[in-house]
Image (cartoon, helix red, strand yellow):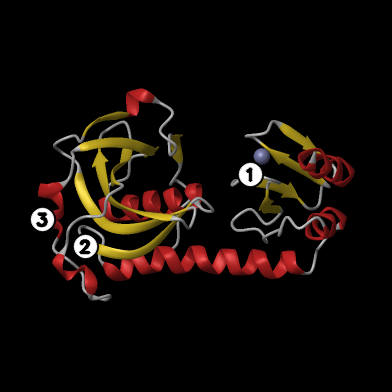
Amino acid sequence: MSWNQNLEILSSNVWGKDAESSAALPEDAVALCAYELFVMAILDMDQIAYIRQTARGDELWMVTEETPYENPTRASADEIAKLEPLLLNQSKQAMRVLTMTHTDSILRSGMFLLSEYFDAVCGFYSPVKILAEGLLIKSDYEEINQRQNATIRRNQEVASKQRTKIIEVASELGLHPQPPLLNPEIWSAQCPSTGHQLYINARKDEFGCGYCCVKGNHEKLREFVESRKT
Ligand SMILES: [Zn+2]
């Protein structure tokens, strides 16, 4: 599927900072599919994506369960569950994460919204397997994921040939820099003596950590690592 020019994200709240976006799931929302997500590669969550079409825009809603659904078919890796039992057990507390321009194709909007969502959370949440089909079926879900993986692979190939000074310094300091995902210039690396990641713009010779409120060039990175040792 090719994305048409008039598909455009109008508002985004993927990290749930906008409290007004959290509400009971609107009754006219239609389930797209349910799937499993890895969160920072340490725990997993189940999520059901919904689309809601209004005249003002098409909205993506998420119901997220940090405790995976009790699902007897879960053990068998390739089996897709029925969506209905998942819908019955869910909390119904939902969040509107994206809004796009309204289109007359709910399928096209659904594909675009879910794809944009996975791109926005890339590096933090990784979609794993589909748990249940809704409006989107397994092949739609796989198409979205394959498209993202192809972009990541392309970016990593380009990046591996452009290891700049700050990447070499980060390696030398033991921060294990990881090549970019969706933004071809942004590497991630371990923030020293913490459990989180910092970000490196390889081309601009710049690193930054939002948690530690620090940024600078490769020399500043050296000083930062040194300051964490004392
Ligand atoms: Zn940090």
Q: Position of residue 41 (x, y in %)?
A: 48, 58
- At a point 71% along the width and 58% down the height, the residue shown is 177
Can residue 1 be seen at all in this image of the molecule?
no
Say whether residue 124 is left or right of residue 29. Answer: right
Residue 184 horizontal side relative to residue 216, left or right: left
Residue visible at 64% across and 35% down? 210
Task: Tell me how far mark 1 sits from mark 3, CA to CA.
Answer: 41 Å
Q: Quickly name the residue at label 3.
A: 84
Relative side of 30 to 15, left or right:
left
Look at mark 1 in the image and give the residue it sits on.
194
Task: Tell me the residue at 21%/74% (across/down).
Answer: 79
Amino acid carrying label 1: it is Thr
Q: Is residue 126 visible?
A: yes
Image coordinates of residue 139 in percent, x first then y, are 31, 71
The reply to whether callout 2 and callout 1 are in contact (CB within 8 Å) is no
What residue did someone put label 2 on? 133
Q: Secondary structure at mark 1?
A: loop
Amino acid under label 2? Glu
Mark 1: C-beta under 8 Å from nearest atom of ligand 1: yes
